[in-house]
Amino acid sequence: MKNTILTITFILLSFLSNAQIEYFAPNLYTIKVLDSLGIPYLPINLRVRGEGFSKKFKSEYVSYFGEDFRYSPYTLPTDQSFKNFIQNKEMEYENDYMYVSILSNLNITVIGESIIPIFDEKNSSVIVLELFCKNSSGFECYTAIAFYETKDGKFDYINENFELAALTGWSMEYK
């Protein structure tokens, strides 16, 4: 709960700043989950900067995700709002309802989606969403979030786990 509130606060404070375009990596726990599943996800912030990863990793990313994500992020008129994307989804936990409710009330667009099947006792897939956010003062950002889809069709937001990141010494560098 504390981590969810911290993430929401960070997003809301970001909207209040007067910056141009910001590119945020998904939370460290999402990266750790994707890495543990052998999924070569390359965060938007690293793709835009063109650093922090090898050519081999870039090639694996492009090959794995194909058309699911735009390598250089941009929006299209056919992209759907986060609110429309999430409206018929049932969340696994009460905290997830609060989180998606807040995001649904912001101007957030889903610019990419990848459904990755996994073989797990509880979950059937990991769903990675790349998002574009814009507020009325002109602040724009790109980021990614992820959900587990449980075997019974519910969504479980993969939220930050700072303790796990600290214990594993996880870094944002890709080889």
Image (cartoon, grey):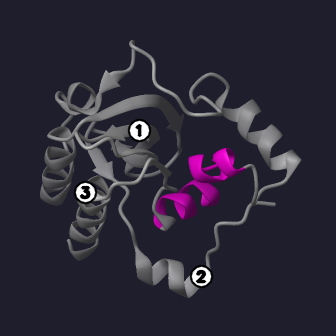
Count neighbours of disc 1 (C-alpha within 10 A) and say few if under 14, some if 14 to 19, many if 20 or more: many
- In x, y percent, where is residue 18? 34, 54
Pair 3/1: label in front = 3
Q: Secondary structure at mark 1?
A: strand
Residue placed under numbered mark 3 in the picture: 16
- Taking the magenta stretch, the answer to whether it contains residue 36 is yes
Residue placed under numbered mark 1 in the picture: 131
Q: CA distance from mark 1 to mark 2?
A: 27 Å
Characterize the magenta stretch by its predominant secondary structure: helix
Q: Amino acid at mark 3?
A: Leu
Count neighbours of disc 2 (C-alpha within 10 A) and say few if under 14, some if 14 to 19, many if 20 or more: few
- The answer to whether residue 40 is visible is no
Which image quadrant is residue 134 in? top left
As drawn, is 171 to the left or to the right of 8? right
Residue placed under numbered mark 2 in the picture: 168
164 or 47, nearer to the observer: 47
Q: Amino acid at mark 1?
A: Leu
Give whichever of discs 3 and 1 has the lower sequence position.
Answer: 3
The stretch of residues the image draws in magenta is: 29-49
138 or 114, nearer to the observer: 138
Give whichever of discs 1 and 2 has the lower sequence position.
Answer: 1
Q: Is residue 16 above or below residue 165?
A: above
Looking at the rendered image, the quarter that the C terminus falls into is bottom right
- In x, y percent, where is residue 27? 45, 62
Residue at 30% x, 50% y is 156
Q: Amino acid at mark 2?
A: Thr
Which image quadrant is residue 79 in? top left
Q: Are marks 3 and 1 in contact (CB under 8 Å)?
A: no
Q: Secondary structure at mark 2?
A: helix
Q: Secondary structure at mark 3?
A: helix
Count neighbours of disc 3 (C-alpha within 10 A) and say few if under 14, some if 14 to 19, many if 20 or more: few
